[in-house]
Image (cartoon, grey):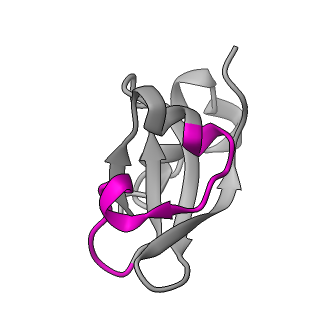
Amino acid sequence: VDQAVPLDRLGPEHVRRPARALPWMETVTAGGDLEAAVRHGRVLPLDQLGATGAGPWLVLDPAGELLAVYEAHRSGTAKPRVVLGAEG
């Protein structure tokens, strides 16, 4: 609420990137082969994903763009709750 902007003054500079809108979620960064696996929605071992804690986790690409949100799955793995899009 303290960051609210009246609708008549709302502009593109006020729109938050998805990763910044969820500051309470832990983030992990995925590049290379891991990024490709995330973009394809693969179930991943937690250690491969680099995730710690109970989740869920925001998965970002190396540029800081949100790729997916992963959640705990079976023992020692995480699965995507949502994948936001393919590269390109």
The residue at the far bottom in this view is 75
Q: Is residue 46 magenta?
A: yes
In the displayed structure image, the side of residue 21 where residue 10 appears, left or right: right
Q: Quadrant of the C terminus?
A: top right
Decide: is 48 above or below 31. Answer: below
Nearest the camera: 8 or 71? Answer: 71
Decide: is 33 above or below 59. Answer: above
Please say whether residue 16 is visible from this viewpoint: no
Decide: is 52 above or below 11. Answer: below
- Residue at 47%, 72% (x, y): give it: 77
Residue 66 x/y as whole percent: 52, 39
- Residue at 45%, 86% (x, y): give it: 75
Stretch in magenta = 37-54
Please say whether residue 85 is visible from this viewpoint: yes
- Residue at 56%, 57% (x, y): give it: 69
Q: Where, by quadrant of the figure, is residue 84 drawn?
A: top right
Nearest the camera: 32 or 13? Answer: 32
